[in-house]
Image (tube, rainbow, N blue to C red):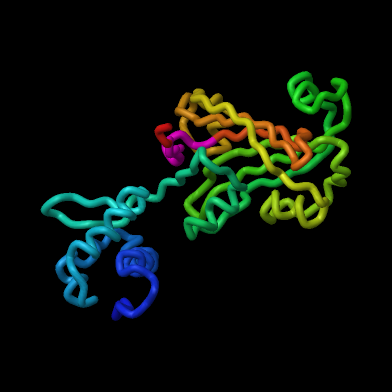
Amino acid sequence: MKHQVDPNSKVPLHSQVERMLRTLIRQPEYQQGAFLPKEVDLANQLGISRNTVRHGISKLVNEGLLVRKKGVGTKVAQRKVSTRLDHWASFSGEMKAKGMEVVNYELESRFVPADMEVAEAFQVSPGTKVLKLSRLRGTSEGPSLLSVSWFHPRLGLSGQEDFSQPLYQMLEREIGVYPTVSREEISAIAAEKKLASRLEVREGAPILFRRRAVFDSDGKAMEFNKVYYQGEGFTYSIDIERK
């Protein structure tokens, strides 16, 4: 495959290289472990400096998409899902941004009486009927997370909605509610037997647990959510600006 950059483009050369690399690493041979062309070979082929190529590669290395070993070469990193704390989106949105297709292994919605925790999150009486959505999700490589959501009764959800599509887009389009703020707590737990079986990990394996309340544009609680992630498949990253 012949790769090119456009020196007359308004897009900086290093950004063009980065874009080219993102396309390159999706090719089957590199997904299967082949080493990328050497920096000097890419630079010669593209007619640009080696430093520009290195800049693009370093960007993908920092994102965890590539692994570079001195004296050996650069290859695609083992797939790891990374999500950020300086913004939030649905799992589908996060995966789409990384070029990964979401697979729903289990999907169930039903009305249940709100327990004390859910009732407190929604400021309703315990026992109030709320819609509960359970989704076992991941990629073609297997399950990655178990997400359990409860929705405030005022949303008027019927339970017949198509929850296989991106959740927040669906709520905006069909219900007219706009998720705006997410308040989250993140901790590490050990997988009990049933959870381990569903996530296909060993019992007692580390699990990343995220508990969050989602509020709409009016500041009202709309979703209470618990997510259990495979501990070895997810990382969180955050940028902190010094004031």
Q: Is residue 55 magenta?
A: no
The residue nearer to you, when weighing 241 against 75, is 241
In the rendering, at what x and y percent does residue 30 appear?
Answer: 31, 63
Q: Is residue 78 above or below residue 122?
A: below
Residue drawn at (58%, 43%) of the image: 88
Which quarter shows the N terminus?
A: bottom left
Q: Dividing the picture into quarters, in which one does residue 117 lie?
A: top right
Residue 186 in the image: x percent, y percent?
54, 28
Q: Is residue 117 left or right of residue 56?
A: right
Vertical placement of 184 versus 89: above or below?
above
Q: Split into 4 quadrants, where in the image is the C terminus?
A: top left
Q: Does the magenta run of residues contain 238?
A: yes
Residue at the farthest left position: 71
Q: Residue 19 appears at what percent x and percent y?
A: 38, 66
Q: Which residues are magenta?
A: 229-240
Relative side of 220 to 184, left or right: right
Q: Position of residue 240 (x, y in %)?
A: 43, 35
Q: Nearer the viewer, residue 165 or 60?
A: 60
Residue ID at (78%, 34%): 220
